C-alpha cells in the first residue's frame, strides 16, 4: 500500500536517514522503534512528502508519490510531534480551521468535527480555548485534526511523549480502535518499546538512520532464543562486580538498573552459578535473581549494545 525504497536524507554533514526500506500493508499497525535521533521523524516527514529525500522513493499503491503527491496526501493523516494549534481559539475553531484547509465546509465539516471530538473524548471541552488544555488534551486535538479528512493511513510521531498517563492510555486505546475497528493503516513511531509491543503487528527497529531489524514482536525476540536475560537485584552495587560480570565468558551485556543489574548471556545451566560465585567473590548480597523473557528492549540492546533510552 505505502512503500519506501532506499530512502535517505542528509542535512549538510549529518546523515539523518540512510537507505531505509519500509512498507505498510492495508490494515496493518506497524511500529517504527528507535532511540532519540535515530531518524524516525525525518523518515516519516519524507513518507508524508513534506520533506524532499536526498535519495530513494515513496510509492503509494504503486504510484511514485514524490512526483504525484495528491493521491497519498488525500489518504494520509499525520500527527506531528510538535503540537500545531492556535492557543487563542477553541478546540472546535481549531478543527474548523484545519477542516477548511482540507476543503471541507458546512454541515459535513460540522458533523465530522463532532465525530472526531467524540473519538478523542473531548466533545464536552470543544468550546474551551486550547490555552486551557493540558499537554495530553492538546495532543488529542492534534490527532482529531489529522482524522478530519477520513485518512486511510495514519502516521504518528511519538504521540505519547511528555503527556499525562490518562491521555496516554486514551491515545493508545484510540489508535487500537482506529486500526481494528476502522481498519485504518497505522505507522506508529516511538522509543517506548512497551507501546510498540502492545500496539503493532509488525515492527521496524531503527538506529543511526538505518533499519537494523524488522518483524513481529515474536520474530524479533526469537533473535534472542539462544540467550537469556537475568535480573539481579541487590542493595550493594559495586563497579568491581559489574566489571567481573562483563569479563565472564558466558555474559554478553551488563546493564546497570535502578535495583541492580540486567545481564544478557548465553543460555546455559552454568550461568546462575557463575553469577552467584562472582557475587560472593565481590561480597555483593543478591536479594533476588530471576530469568526474564526477552523484550524488544533486550533485542535493541543485543543489536546495538546500547539501551533504547540512553
Ligand atoms: N533540519 C535538520 N537539520 C539538521 N539536522 C537534522 C534536521 N532534522 C533532523 N536532523 C538530525 O537528523 C538526525 C535524526 O533526527 P530525527 O529527528 O529524524 O530523529 P528521531 O528518531 O525522530 O528522534 P527524536 O525522537 O529525537 O525526534 C538527528 O541527528 C538530528 O539532529
Image (cartoon, grey):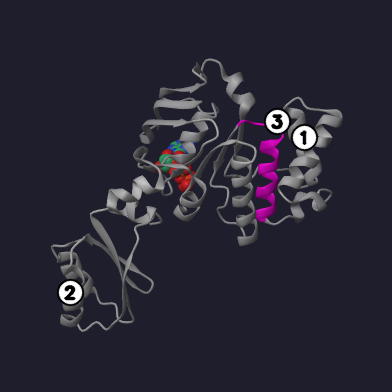
Q: Which mark is residue 273?
A: 2
Q: Secondary structure at mark 3?
A: loop
Residue 88 falls within the magenta-colored stretch: no
Kindly identify which numbered label has been placed on residue 203: none
Q: Is residue 59 left or right of residue 19?
A: right
Disc 1 crowd, CA 10 A, few/some/many (<14, 14-19, 20+):
some
Q: Is residue 245 visible?
A: yes
Element assignment for label 2:
helix
| Label 3 to label 1: alpha-carbon separation | 13 Å
Please tell me whether mark 1 or mark 2 is closer to you in this view: 2
Q: What label sits on residue 97 in the rendered view?
A: 1
Task: Name, please, the residue furthest toward the left.
Answer: 249
* Sooner in the amino-acid sequence: mark 3 or mark 1: 1
Question: Which residue is found at the position 27% from the left and 84% from the top?
Answer: 285
Counting residues from the start of the chain, the first of labels 2 and 3 encountered is 3
- Few, some or many C-alpha atoms within 10 Å of disc 3 (few <14, some 14-19, many ≥20)? some
Circle 1 — which element? helix
The verdict on residue 138 being magenta is yes
* 257 vs 25: above or below: below
Label 1 within 8 A of ligand 1 by Cβ: no
Among all residues in the image, which is located at the extreme right? Answer: 107
Residue at figure coordinates x 51%, y 25% from the top left: 1
In the image: residue 75, left or right of residue 53: right
Q: Which circle's residue, 1 or 2, is located before the other in the chain?
A: 1
Ligand 1: quadrant of the figure: top left
Foreground of the two, 20 or 18: 20
Rounded to the nearest angstrom, the CA distance separating label 2 from label 3 is 60 Å
The residue shown at (18%, 63%) is 268
Q: Is residue 238 above or below residue 254?
A: below
* Residue stretch in magenta: 135-152
Residue annotated with mark 3: 149
Amino acid at each position: 500500500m505505502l512503500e519506501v525504497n532506499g530512502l535517505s536524507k542528509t542535512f549538510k554533514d549529518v546523515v539523518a536517514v540512510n537507505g531505509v526500506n519500509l512498507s505498510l500493508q492495508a490494515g496493518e499497525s506497524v511500529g517504527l522503534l528507535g532511540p532519540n535521533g535515530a531518524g524516525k521523524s525525518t523518515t516519516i516527514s519524507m513518507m508524508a512528502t513534506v520533506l524532499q529525500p536526498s535519495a530513494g522513493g515513496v510509492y503509494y499503491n504503486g504510484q511514485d508519490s514524490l512526483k504525484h503527491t495528491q493521491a497519498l496526501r488525500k489518504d494520509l493523516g499525520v500527527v506531528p510531534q510538535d503540537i500545531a494549534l492556535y492557543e487563542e481559539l477553541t478546540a472546535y475553531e481549531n478543527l474548523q480551521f484545519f477542516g477548511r484547509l482540507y476543503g471541507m465546509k458546512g454541515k459535513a465539516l460540522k458533523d465530522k468535527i463532532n465525530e472526531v471530538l467524540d473519538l478523542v473524548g473531548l466533545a464536552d471541552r470543544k468550546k474551551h480555548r486550547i490555552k486551557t488544555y493540558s499537554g495530553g488534551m492538546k495532543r488529542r486535538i492534534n490527532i482529531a485534526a489529522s482524522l478530519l479528512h477520513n485518512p486511510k493511513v495514519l502516521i504518528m510521531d511519538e504521540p505519547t511523549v511528555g503527556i499525562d498517563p490518562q491521555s496516554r492510555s486514551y491515545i493508545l486505546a484510540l489508535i487500537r480502535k482506529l486500526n481494528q475497528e476502522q481498519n485504518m493503516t497505522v505507522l506508529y513511531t516511538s522509543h517506548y518499546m512497551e507501546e510498540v509491543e502492545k500496539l503493532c503487528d509488525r515492527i521496524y527497529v531503527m538506529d543511526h538512520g538505518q533499519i537494523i531489524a524488522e518483524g513481529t514482536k515474536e520474530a524479533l525476540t526469537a533473535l534472542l532464543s539462544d540467550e537469556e536475560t537475568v535480573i539481579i537485584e541487590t542493595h550493594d552495587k559495586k563497579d568491581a562486580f559489574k566489571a567481573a560480570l562483563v569479563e565472564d565468558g558466558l555474559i554478553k551485556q551488563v546493564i546497570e538498573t535502578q535495583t541492580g543489574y540486567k545481564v544478557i548471556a548465553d543460555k546455559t545451566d552454568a550461568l546462575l552459578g557463575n553469577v552467584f560465585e562472582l557475587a560472593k567473590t565481590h561480597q555483593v548480597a543478591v536479594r533476588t535473581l530471576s530469568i526474564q523473557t526477552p523484550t524488544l528492549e533486550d533485542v535493541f540492546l543485543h543489536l546495538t549494545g546500547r539501551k533504547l533510552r540512553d
